Amino acid sequence: MTVHVSFQQTGELVAPGTAKTLFNAAVNVLRKRHPKNELWNVHTEDWYTAIVRDVEVTTSKRRILVGLPVHEKSEGIGREVLCRMMQASLSVAPNKQLQAIKDRIALVTTFLAIGRSGEVGFTSYNLSKWNSIYECINLEWPNLKRSEQQPLSFFPDVDCMEIDFYHAFGCYLAVGGDSSSVSSMDAESWIFPFLRANAAAKVTEAVKRFVGKVPGVPSGATGTCLRVGGAIEATMRAGVVAAVHRGGWEYPVASVTTMLEYMVQSPETLALAGKALAGWPEPRHFVSPPRCDNVTNTLTPAESIRFGNCISALFSNARCDLLHHLRPFAFTMFASLLMYLGSFIQKYGDKHIVIVNLVTTADRFQFSKATLIHWGQLIQQDWKDRNTNALAGTVDWRRKVEDLEATVQKLTHQNDALTTQLGRIEANQEQLLSAVLQLHQGCSAPPVPTSAPTCSTPDIAADVSDTTSTILTTTITITPELTTIVPDTTNTTLTATTTTPNLSPTICPQRVCSTPAEATPSKKRPRTSFLPQAPTVVRYTCKTSALDIAALYHAAFTVGTVVDHIDKRERQRVHAVVKNAATLLRTSTESRLLDISRRLQTAPVSTTSSAWEGWNRIHTQASVELKDIVMKLMQPDVKVGDAAYKPTVCAVGSRLLKQGV
């Protein structure tokens, strides 16, 4: 028996699969025409298998020799392409909208079921059930190739209205549910009666309408492209086991363990693939469909009755009482219609047949279009709130994560800048400590020669009777920002100045006047106090360390108030300075100075408002006590080290009191 399959079809050699199909068709025709031929009585049909194999090999070889692909595999249509197809379908002219709605539900259902093209036409209302556990509709999907039925669960889409199963189904029923295709009572339970005859060809025809019109649709697209695309989406998101089972492929179950078989048949596996095909990034999380609860909870009893009647009237052409055993399904479809109502009108206009039917039905029950849109917003917000976990991987969530990362980076840079600034502050505190130590050393320095004139304020110098002693000139600039004290190593002058924007130390040079006449007197002395105020400069000259220590206390407390904290190490240094000051004074004020030091050590470190107020209280109280110390030093019965320093103490104290200290 010779088989020749070198004929061409549409200018090309037929594919191996097509050649086998043609050969099988020829064998079937011969069997019908010659049923009594002895050839059919042969028990072993090895000859038939050999011929089929020869047809496949010969056809494949000839296609290779002419540069054609051996197998013409279907290219998958995934979620994005299908969404664009359905957008184009909903945008057609009014006279084509009814057919577009029917094509939409057929293509969306086939894709979500990973079904063969002809299987979608054999789904039935009577075999459908609402799964109250997973809150989804379960359709008994007919697997014609394996002569089986398997339950498939369908979930709302994560972000695409056009391929949302509940919205597509609701639109289909809102325009009549193909009631015109029902010719007898026997077919009233079929969901898609228009697909009962030649379903595969009709699905393929519906797909081919988008070839060349929608980007991404393969040139040779068929209904199988939906099955391939659905399988790829399910495998990528839910795994191969869930995808294989949902698609109804034959695989060697006998080679796997019984536990795997149980897992494959479990509702969890069925739901996993269904949620993955609906685009949910986390299909293992619970997914809840849109609900009308957020609307019905705000209605009065009379309005609730009208609400239910509105749904019943809208879906009255479904030839099945959806409000009976599929009541949750009906409410979910209506909620989906409302949730996407605003987007639907914005994209496809309010003259679309679905919108016209929906608004017309709602008007009959005294519900306006604005009310429907408002209800849709409530339903959408409630739906998103109930699916927060399952939405964790969507684009919107990733955008929020990116914004959070940007905020963290910004705060990190600000923290680095603050750390650098605090480092500079610490360096200035080091300068302050160095200045204190130099001041302490300067108090015990040998006296300068009498012949060397010094630069000082005239009225202060007039009060100094002993010009042979060491004279220290201290300039202190007090600001609420920051005070640093920097020594001038060219003479015995100590300078304190303010550095607000730049925290590096600033040296204010002093020079020794050649004659007393070079010293320009100040006409008006600025007022100052121990509390931080506006920038003020005070110059005074003394021959004792008591008032110098008081001035340093002033600077130290100002720094403490501005910086809002002094670390432990710095407190210890200030405490040491206070002890040295008490020793130098040799008066009964030592215990009070030590008490001031202890309060400084225990001051709060936090930058809170309460800590700031605590520092101000400490600063104020310490300033008052320092003022009291100065006044006591001026009393006749108080000894201040060397008796020769007593007039200077009194003179400087009087001057400070006049200045408002």
Image (cartoon, rainbow, N blue to C red):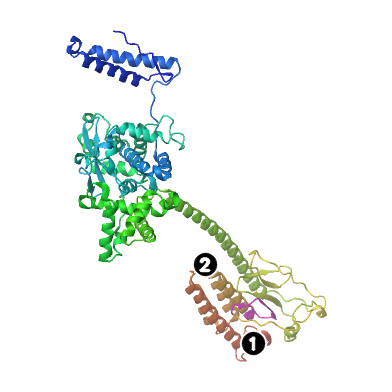
Earlier along the polypeptide chain: callout 1 or callout 2? 2
Residue picked out by circle 2 = 567
Q: Return the x and y of residue 411 as percentages of the image width and height.
A: 51, 58
Disc on res. 657: 1
Q: Residue at x 35, y 15 (%)?
A: 57
Quadrant the N terminus occupies: top left
Q: Nearer the viewer, residue 147 or 643?
A: 147
Q: Nearer the viewer, residue 307 or 395?
A: 307
Q: Residue at x 18, y 9 (%)?
A: 38
Segment colored magenta: 531-549
For the question of whether residue 135 can be seen, the reply is: no
Amino acid at circle 2: Asp
Q: Return the x and y of residue 367 as percentages of the image width and height.
A: 34, 61
Disc on res. 52: none
Compared across the picture, whether 401 is left or right of 337 comes to right
Q: Return the x and y of residue 17 as percentages of the image width and height.
A: 34, 21
- Residue 542 within the segment the image draws in magenta: yes
Q: Nearer the viewer, residue 323 or 527?
A: 323
- Residue 507 within the segment the image draws in magenta: no
Q: In the picture shown, does residue 20 fall above or below 193? A: above
Amino acid at circle 1: Leu
Res. 20 image quadrant: top left
